Image (cartoon, grey):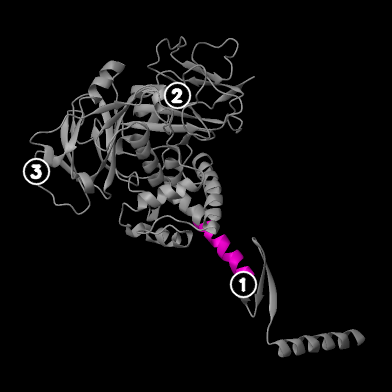
Amino acid sequence: MKNKQNLVIAAFVGALAFATTGAFAQVIDTRIGKIETVNGFPTAEAAKKIFGESDFQRATQSYLWGLPAVGFHGLHLAHLNIFGAKDGEVVLYVTLKDKAGMLTPNLTTIYAMNFWNLEKQGPLVIIVPAGASAGGVLDIWRRPITDVGQTGPDKGQGGKYLILAPGAPDPMNSEFITVRSKSNPIWFATRGLGEDPAVAEATVRKYKLYAYDERPNPPVTKFIPVGDKTWSSEQPRDLKYWQYLHDVLALEVPEERDRFFYGMMLPLGIVQGKPFSPTESQKKVLTEAAVVGDLLGRLTAYSKRVEGTEVWKDKHWEYALMVELDQTYKGYGQIDERGSWFYDAIGNTVGMQGRTLGFGQLYLEAQKDKTGAWLDGGKSYHLRVPPNAPVELFWSFTIYDYLTRGPMITPQGAADISSRTKGLVANADGSVDLYFGPKKPTGSNDNYVMTMPGKGSFTYFRFYGPKEAYFDKSWQLPDLEEVK
């Protein structure tokens, strides 16, 4: 009875206190700490904490969302400021040194790349030569506008393409294959696919690019070598990321699919039509979010949690490229698939989807060995490529630096082996044993790529012109195995 009386007294005292103050305080436990409220309203300090967390979450997701556009802008700045290439001039990437700053480049083929602004420079004409080349034109979000060359409408026979800006009038010129971009800034890239490097370079040098209005007297297309320059196109992990994103978004009218992200970034100081001048508190949030955003991008790329990544059952090979051409699938926008690929790479075309027999390219990726352990640059590994690899042109195996996503740079001066590698050693049955690690394993052959201790790595296996045995899965790659 006495305990019951005490409870009644305590309840009366509590009610009297509430009647006196007119306020009810409560502390709510959350993942961001204790949140104090009065009559249900967060206190001023609690509100600051909640909005701060909201801004951080918005910025982290905006980092993942912005990866394709920021990557576009970073490569464009390299063309302008490092290589000295104006919009309309073509940069040639030939050697490993040339490609060292590129995200997951193919080291077997030569690249030629160009940027163009349709609003400032007018419609772009691309004259594609006949021969072994393949590439495409992409918008600022890395969506393909058209393929060109062997994977394009000209099918490698050569053709004339006209690229129009959003809303620009169509001249209705039947001389051209006419396509329209969704953005004003665009990017053109092609590969020379000839087995002889000299022939491959000669082919891409036959491309011509100029403004549509210049067609009566077209200028000579200027090709610029990368030269002995150190550069990088990886997306920044600091405040510079947001400067890049602000600058590239300033060039465009928001698409309907992106308007919520534009709205999410308003409290972060990223506003179209206004300079990027974040406050100290905004700088802090953006800087912290860039670090976590980069980690999120890394996991999205190398610990994929979307469906359908597994190539062969119970093996660690994954499809590197999971994003559709329009970046949507079954009614949803592919923010994870898009973030995964464009954290890792720079382009996407019809030819890169790897879904057509004998056509284009196919990209498989492995970051783990047979046991499921991450690849370690301080350990040695072996891969046996089975005989009769199902390719029309060639296959290649490349080692990339986990952090830069560029080729692994070592004193050896090589980061890949392909079926076109001079001196490639094959076994009697046609299989090929490949080795990579800090030192050449005892008893191994010359099919060896050096890695660096202290660096994580991941690998790509590319099929150029995949054949039926790949699609029906009668031919499969084994897992990478550590050599001890």
In space, the residues marked 3 and 1 are separated at their CA atoms by 64 Å
Q: In the displayed structure, does residue 283 sit left or right of residue 226?
A: right
- Specify the label residue 173 is tagged with: 3
Question: For mark 3, does the 10 Å Cα neighbourhood hold few (<14), some (14 to 19), or many (20 or more) residues?
Answer: few
- Residue 407 position within the rendered picture, expressed as x and y whole percent measured from the top left: 46, 27
Chief secondary structure of the magenta portion: helix
Q: Quadrant of residue 114?
A: top left
> Quick check: 38 left or right of 172?
right
Q: Which amino acid, mark 3? A: Asn
Q: Is residue 394 above or below residue 428?
A: below
| Circle 1: residue type | Ala
**Labelled pair 3, 1 in contact (Cβ < 8 Å):** no
Q: CA distance from mark 2 to mark 1?
A: 57 Å
Tell me which segment is drawn in magenta. Answer: 45-58
Query: Image quarter for residue 86?
Result: top left
Q: Is residue 337 above or below residue 456?
A: below
- Which of discs 3 and 1 lies nearer the camera? The answer is 1
Number of residues whose C-alpha sits closer than 10 Å to that of mark 1, classed few (under 14), some (14–19) or many (20 or more): few
On residue 417, which mark appears? Answer: none
12 and 209: which is toward the camera: 209
Q: In this figure, which residue is indicated by the disc labeled 1?
A: 44
Q: What residue is pinned by disc 2?
A: 397
Is residue 154 something that shows in the picture?
Answer: no
Q: Residue 460 versus residue 201: which sits nearer the camera? A: 201
Circles 2 and 3, Cβ within 8 Å, touching? The answer is no
